Amino acid sequence: MSYLRRSRKSAPAKATSLEEQQAKINEVRKLIGSLADRIPNFCSDACISRYLRARNWSAEKASKMLKETVKWRLEYKPESIRWDDISHEAETGKIYRADYVDKYGRAVLVMRPGFQNTTSTEGQIKYLVYCMENAILSLTADQEQMVWLIDFQGWTMASVSVKVTRETAHVLQDYYPERLGLGILYNPPRIFESFWKIVKPFLDHKTYKKVKFVYSDDTESQKIMTDLFDVDKLESAFGGRNPCVFDFDKYAERMREDDKKMDAFLNSGGSLLSQEKSLSSLLQKTESSISEALSEASSEDSFSSATESPKQEGIKSHSENGMQEHH
């Protein structure tokens, strides 16, 4: 059962004005108490706002979620992972941050699950976390989300690990809420439909609604790419005109430079969150997303009646919802 479906029953308080939203943020800050002091600058208003949005502005649920994240960050220390710790996971280009952004300025993570080169769940999740931290580091002050481009080249059911999939969904949804702006599944094979049925229960409704299926042989779904990206910068593997391919050595050099930037942030006593936009700008931007989330919660029938075919699902989602997730 998705979170937004549950929210219809629990009917949490709705924050509809800047003042009410700020009050919710202050309430969360009070609920988490001194725990926030254990990671200086992490629990900014912008950060708390993301957790509130993820939990439909329920301060109680958002604070519980945020507490778990703080505990996880204290134990896992994601900001301390460096390229040399996980470089072996990156050798095939199964996940990397593109050197371009979308038209909304969002960082782009390219994922190729068919290029899996290791068997350790722990190692794969550690590399994913490194990529998330790196993508957040690259975000500009007026942006807090990213886009995932998932290329199914070489993908087969043998590429599937339900354990890794479940853990990936847990880490991303619970520890990085509202960081995903859009997830594009590019040319998934027909057999992927069976795996999609396994994956969907791991996703809350808000995450599910951000997933789009795009096919290179379908003009309507391909329009998602031209709406989102400058085709001169977009890689040819995704229908763009950029012929570049993943180069491990060049990417390693780039990541080591980013590691130095991360060290500079941490050594200065700062935080990745310190470069985020002002609270007023953030809250104004999220007012429309709050209304959209509440609207989605009341449109369960249309969600339930969606076709199970990924190819049809992608086309229908684009035609019905347009670019609603794009801020």
Image: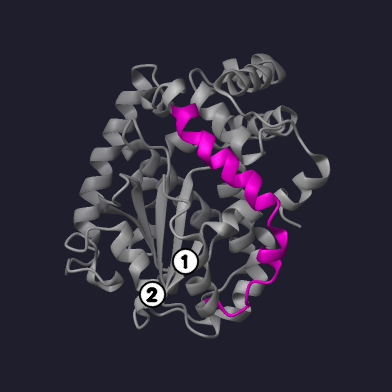
Q: How far is the residue under mark 2 from the one under mark 1?
A: 8 Å
Query: Whole-percent x and y of residue 73?
Result: 56, 33
Q: Residue at x 48, y 49 (%)?
A: 180
From the viewer's side, name the closer residue of 33 and 289.
Answer: 289
Is 35 rendered above or below residue 120? above
The secondary element bearing badge 1 is classed as helix
Give the amino acid type for the residue marked by disc 1 in the picture: His
Q: Which residues are magenta?
A: 282-310
Instruction: Decide whether residue 196 is among the magenta residues.
Output: no
Q: Which residue is mark 1?
A: 318
- Which quadrant does the N terminus fall into? bottom right
Q: Which mark is residue 220?
A: 2
Q: Residue at x 28, y 32 (%)?
A: 261
- Side of 107 where 197 appears, left or right: right
Nearest to N terminus: mark 2 or mark 1: 2
Task: Specify the quadrant of the image occupied by residue 290.
Answer: top right
The secondary element bearing badge 2 is classed as helix
Give the amino acid type for the residue marked by disc 2 in the picture: Glu
- Side of 163 where 263 appears, left or right: left
Is residue 284 at least partly visible in the picture?
A: yes
